[in-house]
Structures are given as structure tokens and as C-alpha cells.
Amino acid sequence: MSEEHNATETGTTSGGRRRRGAEGRRAARRGVALEQLTYIDRKLAPFEILNDEGLSLIEQNAETVLAEIGIDFRDDREALGMWKEAGADVKGERVRFPRGLCRELLKTAPESFTQHARNPARSVEIGGKSTVFAPVYGPPFVRDLDGERRYAKLEDFENFVKLAYLAPAIHHSGGTVCEPVDVPVNKRHLDMAYSHIRYSDKPFMGSVTHPSRAEDTVAMAKLVFGDEFVDQNCCITSLINANSPMTYDDTMLGALKVYARAGQATVVSPFILSGAMSPVTTAGTLTQILAEAMAGMAFSQLCRPGAPVVFGTFASSISMQSGAPTFGTPEPALVLYGAAQLARRLKVPFRSGGSLCGSKVPDAQAAYESAQTILPTVLAGVNFVLHAAGWLEGGLVSSYEKFIMDVDQLAMMQRFAEGIDLSENGQALDALKEVGPGNHFLGCGHTQANFEAAFYRSIVADNNSFEQWEAEGSQRIENRANGLAREWLRSYVAPAIDQGLDEALQGFIRGRKEAMPDAFH
Amino acid sequence: MSEEHNATETGTTSGGRRRRGAEGRRAARRGVALEQLTYIDRKLAPFEILNDEGLSLIEQNAETVLAEIGIDFRDDREALGMWKEAGADVKGERVRFPRGLCRELLKTAPESFTQHARNPARSVEIGGKSTVFAPVYGPPFVRDLDGERRYAKLEDFENFVKLAYLAPAIHHSGGTVCEPVDVPVNKRHLDMAYSHIRYSDKPFMGSVTHPSRAEDTVAMAKLVFGDEFVDQNCCITSLINANSPMTYDDTMLGALKVYARAGQATVVSPFILSGAMSPVTTAGTLTQILAEAMAGMAFSQLCRPGAPVVFGTFASSISMQSGAPTFGTPEPALVLYGAAQLARRLKVPFRSGGSLCGSKVPDAQAAYESAQTILPTVLAGVNFVLHAAGWLEGGLVSSYEKFIMDVDQLAMMQRFAEGIDLSENGQALDALKEVGPGNHFLGCGHTQANFEAAFYRSIVADNNSFEQWEAEGSQRIENRANGLAREWLRSYVAPAIDQGLDEALQGFIRGRKEAMPDAFH
């Protein structure tokens, strides 16, 4: 388990994996998460549900889709020309790929890459045995700490960046943690990138809503990291959704081209509500996902061979009665496990999963569904996990309370991925001999030496007696999460930033904002 | 997936895996669970976290515990004599086992066995690739449908038996689904066994609180199945807890002897709150669990070679601050996966897990913790799952609402365990060709032919729009579960029973009750 031992800059100084003594106990009681964990380095082999034969079958079918049906690349002549040049069969906007072409092109894509953070201790590895948790992406609404459901504002955006900065098992600041709809649509990407850079020191994602906004993000990254460094290293990841089924549009292709050519990472993600955007069956959905992802990822390699690219998958089922998306059910979990295996065979990093749910409130439905997504996410060996915290209501809402509950679960998943300690201390034979039949282990030396680190301590679960719980007001978990979110935001201290850099970023943003009239659509 | 196609006797007649047409849709809307699933026949290989080397290490350490520390068999001279006879070193009540003795004795235990139900279609296989879900066991309290937390009554007991009878993915009626404290303690086992037999036709568990009560349960089973059949087949399972660490007491040994000698199954379960009853480390806990389980299971084979026996494990951590048990955290999941692997190596069935939680109410804490237990339970390949539904508040409370939410999750787990359909229909290549880029799959023939069975439909999740959800009263999942529990109990119709058998059972109970004064302690 790789864990940081540096104290963070939240106003407290003592370090160490788990802080000891009175100061540590006070910090724990305050609930302020001080010690950051780096990305997960999984010690457990992934759970696999398909054998080689099944995987080969799906790969063959995906090649059939690519060769016989093809993928549309819409409103982008340049992309069509690049595909023609690469040997694909281009008719109108339909591109058909000779069997093996995409796979061949993908050989230049890295199996794993580092995304750099402005604090080097927060850089993450994406690929291989790593798992990186990032917050929810995209909701236009928030459910705030007064329980109101309303449109998100820039202040909410900053708050979620701050919470993600403080949460130990959030390794990545994410992207559109909520949509700040109070800022003009053509300018908000600047404020979003600034928030990630200024209020966090974890890695972040760039704008994909217009090629020029992607260019702005790259320009801001260059202010932080330097031109040469950005050209040679990944400093931005970006979410490029396919318009499933089997279509990429000019907006997404435009952003993809900017980032790939700048050497930045794209997460090429078929966005699937099975039954509507893909076949109702799991194997059929996997076939389509693989075909779409291969075509999109291969295109990134046409833009710049070696550009980091991630095989993405967002998969949900729909209610065949209402058409609404559903989460936490068995079928998306099967898709997730299968797609993770397909990505590993392609030797590219994989993105999927999260803490997804359809519930409108952070109740047991939200929790069952989220757990039934995040646990498969970790067991499948997903490398990059968007929506790991804060997701509510099918992704329409970023919830403060849910965010806190989710990050507690993520820390548990991180601990779980460490596996079992088989050292002599872990075996505890001396403790067994010391205590013996009929006695208890609470006071023995081995317990005393290990108890502080022995068990994960939830930040929001109540394990008191019924009587004590009742005396403390019969609170539900969301009440406790609410209190903790307020406390984290109150105690938040921004990470240090170079004054000159901060001014340069603000100057760049001012210049860009002044160069365009506000747009709200 | 083995599923029953018989209509049950709940007043509706049509069968089929998923009922079709208007009648089926009405039934689905009513939420009354009509079609019973048989036990799970897992198509997926279990998730494993220890390699052979790690498992061997723990086995060696467990043999060291058995040989050098030993296990206490308290207040049972007969047991001590049997161990001496078998070649163990007996000093006082401490039994030390030559290395390999327990493992050798366990060779007569079956790797898998059938527990018969009075409805043969409900008989379950325990062992191998099967997973059997049974309700919560043991709570003295209920949280009732009016939200009150109070002592459980026989009426509650009967209600939980009825709900378990109706729940499709509950395969087993369980045992003490709650403790009917309104019935004298020395007589309630008779009413409990009668409830399981009369109000359900699924397999059930017997009393273990006194040897004479175990004998009563065997006698009642003989009325149902016949003397000869019971002697030659498993018709009762029973929960035999170790007094961890490393102790068996006379009550548990007394019940174990009755059941094993009658050819009935015992689930020999170390009951572990790590840090108190076992070392704080996972490997140390696994070592102790294996030693305790081996000694207890081997004893069952001394009672009757070939008697069905299950390797049980109840494992939780404790809060090292308050001493309270905690659930859904990473460490018990690691213990669960490890113990399942150890049981497989011993070639005996395994019991563990459930839908465990510490929360006082069916909120998100309850759901996160339950999901973080039941999903590992299924992935680990547990064969017999007590506490699969209804568990609340650390097992002090049987909750009607939680029961309904849990059985929804269980049905999802059952679907998940089917894995991915790779048939031609599953591959859906024709659908992909028919629909093509940019269109949708909702109306295509493949979707139409498959949609009714394609996705698991939750009985309590809300997936409507926010506006619709709000218009319907902004209900939380527990409100919907409450309504469904009431509806199930209202619509419940008891399975048919032979009049003569019913009279014989009632006569037996009357006789036994008249033979003893009431006792309440």
C-alpha cells in the first residue's frame, strides 16, 4: 500500500500513517481527514467472469462490427481523411475498419501512464494494478447541506473540489464535479480549471465541450507545469464520450484531437444505457462497447502515436417499462467485469464504475446501488474511477452528504485492496498462545501493539448501543455526513501556490473572458 | 440457473420463469413474489485472495494451535472421553490434537449434501457451487411495520416465516428468525419448529438451546418425513457456535451430539469479534477460526461418521474505542474470503456472511454495510448464508423493512451468479446489424424478444423522474419496503399440509408443553 507520509497543508502538522496520541484522537473526533492516501496499488487479482474462449468470441464479434457495420465519425472531415489514410474504408461519414486495424494502431498506446499533479506526491498512475478514485462528473444540480435540490453554482463547484482535496481516498480532483450554471457556458471551463488548480493539488480533468475550451485547459496546464513538460507528460485527463451506438460527434472528436495532439490523456467512453443505446443482452453490449472503444482509442493514436488513452465504459440498464436508467443491478456489474477483462487484453488502462445510484435521496436505495457498483469497480480492477463520490439521482445531482458517505466507502475499498498481511505479526501465533482458550484478546500485547491500525474506522457509521444512539438524537447516517461536510469545509485551508503562478492563471482567465461575450446556451 | 417452474400455493396459478402478459404485469405491480427460485447454482468461480502458500501457512498454524494450545470442551465428560478414545491428548477439559488428526477425521464428512424440505421442490443442496440464502437468526427485538422497536413475539416469528416463504430468493426458512419472547423459553422451540413446518415449505433449522429441545425438533421432523427417512437424510440444519476463543460448551456440544447422531446437519461456527475473541489481525483470526472449526467438525464425525457438517464463520471486527461490533468494513470481508478458501480445501460446505449491519435504522449505513457483506458472501462462494435478510442493529433487531430490501438484493445476487449468456441470442450480432450507428435499440426485434427477462427489476427501487417521485410523495426506500411487507403479509396463503400431519404435530407439541412447567429464564 503506497501511502503518503507528508502532512498536508490543512493547518495541522503531525504526520504518520495513522496519527497517534491525544492530538490524533482529537483530529479523529473532529473528523477532518488529514492524511492523504495515494492511488490504490491493488494486491489482489481481479475477479474475472469470462474465460479466454468467451473473451475471444466477443473480440471476434467486435471486429465484425468494426468491419461490417462500421462507426460514424460525424461532421469531422479531418477525422474521415485520417481514417482513409490509415487504411479504413470510408463511405460518407461511415468508417469501416479492416479486421485487426484498430488493434494494430493501439499498439502505440501506453499500458499505464502517470498523470502529474502540481503536488508531485499526488501524481497518479493510471493502468496496471492501480485504481484512482475521482469525484462525480457532470451533474447540473446539487442537493445542498440544507437539503435543497437546486441548480449548481460555482461556489458548489469549489466546495466539491475542496471536499475532494480533503478526502483521503479521493486521489484525483476530477472534472465537472457539478455544472456551475451561474457562470456563462463559454467561460465556466476557465473557472473550473482554476478551481482544480487553486483549491486542490490533486490531478484534474479538462474541458471537452469545445475544442477551444480544451485548448484553454492545455494552456492553463502549461502555466502550471511548463510547455515542454506538458508536451512530454500527461497533466490532464479528459472524458470523451461516444454517442452510442457506434457514433462519434464533432464536439468530442474536436476535444479528443486537441488533447491527444498535446500528449494529454483521453478517456474514450462508450456511454451505454443497455436496451436503448446497445442490445439488451450483456454479451451484445460488451461487443458494442469494445468496437466503439477500439475505434475511438485507435483514432487517438492517429492523432499522436503514444498519446495516453483509457478504455472507458459507462454502462447502466434501463427500466424497460419507463425507459429510466437503473443502477446497482446485476447486468451493469456483469458488463463492468467483462469490459475490464477486454481492456486488459488490449493492454490499455480501463475506466468504469463509480458510486452510481438512481435514488433521489441518500437513503438505503442510494447506498445499496452505490455499493453494488463500487465494489465490482474495485474487484474488476478498474484503473480510473469517475463518479466515485457524490453521485445521486442518476447523475443529475451532486450531493454533499452522499459525497461524505461515499468517500468513507472508498477508504474501506482502499484498505480491502491491501489484502491479508501474512507477516509474523499478521499471523499472531504468539497472541494465540498468550491468550488461550476462554480468555479475551483485548488486553494482550499483540492487540495493544496493533489496535490503532488494525481495523478501518468509519467516519460516519454509528456503532454505539441503541440507548446511546437514541440519547444522541437517533441520527441517521446522512445527518452525520451533513455535519462532517460542514466541518470539512469550515476547516479547509487551500494548498499553497506560487504567487506568480496564481497571477498568471488569473491573468490568462481574465484575458480569455474579455475576448468573448457571455453565452448561456 | 436452476429455477422452479411450479406455481406456488399463494392463490395464483400461472407459472413460468417470468410471467408474461397483463396478469404478470399486475402481479409485478402488486409486488407479490410468486415464483420461487431454488438455491443458487453459481456459474462464476469464487473470488480468492490467498494463494496456496498463504493457505498452507494458515493451515500449519492452525495445526499448531490444535496441537500446542488445544481447545477446551467444557462440562462434557462424554466428549472428553470420545476425544481420548480418538487419540487426542486430554488434560482436564483441554484437548490437544496430534497434527493431522482433525483433518483425518473430517474425511468422512460429505463435501455437499441435500437438506430436504417438505416440498421436494424446495430442497436445497449445501456445498459445492451452491449458495442457499436463509433469513436473520437470533434477534430478541423487532422493528415493526409501525416503526416501533420492541421485543419480538410469536406473531412476529410467524410473519418472518411467511415473508421468507414468499421471497423468491430466500431458499431456506432459517431458524430463530426472531426470538418469540412471549412464549416460555423452554417451550418456544416447539412453536418455532411448527411455524417453519406449517407456514412454509422450505427447509428449516432446529433448536440448539438444550439437548432435549434438539430431540424435540428431530421428533417433529420424523413426523413430517418419517423415522427412516430422517435417519438416512438431512432434514434439519442447526447452528452450533463455538465459544471463541477455542472453547465449546456443554449446551452446544449437547445439541451437536443429538443432531449429528440423528444424521442431521450441524453448522459449526466460530463466533468471532476480532480483537476481542480472536487476534486483531486477519491472518491470526483465520488461524483461530480454522482450528476451532476443525475441532468442532471433527467432533461431529466422532458422533457419527458421515454426518453432514458445515464449516461456519461469523466474523466481525470491533470498535477498539467502544468495543462495539462493526460491520461492512474491509477486515471481516477479508476474513470471509479467506475462510471460504480454507473450507474448500477441507472439502466441506461453508457458512458465513449475510446482510449484516450495525445501523439502528434501515438507512444508508445499513445498506452500505449489508451490501459490503452480502456481495463478498456471494463472490466468496459461501454455501449457506444465515442472516441474508432482515438483520438490523448488529443482530439485535429483525426488521420487516430491511427484510424486504434485503431480499431484493438477494434476487439480484442470484441473477448475477448466472454470469454472462454467450449464446447466439446473447451475442446479439443481428441486433447490432439491424440497428446500426446512431439509432436506438428500443424497438428492434431482439430487444422486443428479450426485454421482459433482460434486466432484473427491483421490487423497491425508485427509478422515476424527480418530478414523478416528488408527485408520489418523495418516498424513501423504507417507505416502499414497508408497503410491500404489508402487502405480502396480507396476500399470504399458507402452503397446503396434510391434515393428519398437522394434527400429529399439534398433538406432539401439546404433549410436550403439558409435560413441563413454563420457564422464562
Image (spheres, coloured by chain):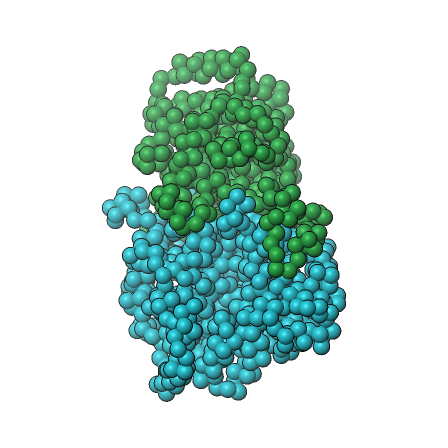
Chain colours: A cyan, B green
The picture quadrant where one finds residue A176 is bottom left
Quadrant containing the N terminus of chain B is top right
Horizontally, residue A342 falls left or right of residue B140, namely right
Horizontally, residue B520 falls left or right of residue B214, namely left
Which residue is painted at 38% across and 82% down in the image? Answer: A514
Which residue is painted at 25% across and 49% down in the image? Answer: A472
Compared with B486, A62 (above or below) is below
Quadrant containing the C terminus of chain B is top left
Q: Position of residue A53 (x, y in %)?
A: 73, 55
The picture quadrant where one finds residue B404 is top left
Q: Position of residue B7 (x, y in %)?
A: 58, 27
Can you see residue A427?
Answer: no
In front of the other: A1 or A111: A111
In front of the other: A84 or B47: A84
In front of the other: A23 or A441: A23
Q: Position of residue B424 (x, y in %)?
A: 72, 48
Q: Position of residue A293 (x, y in %)?
A: 62, 65
Report the number of numbered marks. Answer: 0
Compared with A119, B228 (above or below) is above
Can you see residue B422?
Answer: yes
Which residue is painted at 74% across and 73% down in the image? Answer: A87
Which residue is painted at 55% across and 45% down in the image? Answer: A320
Horizontally, residue A185 falls left or right of residue B33, namely left
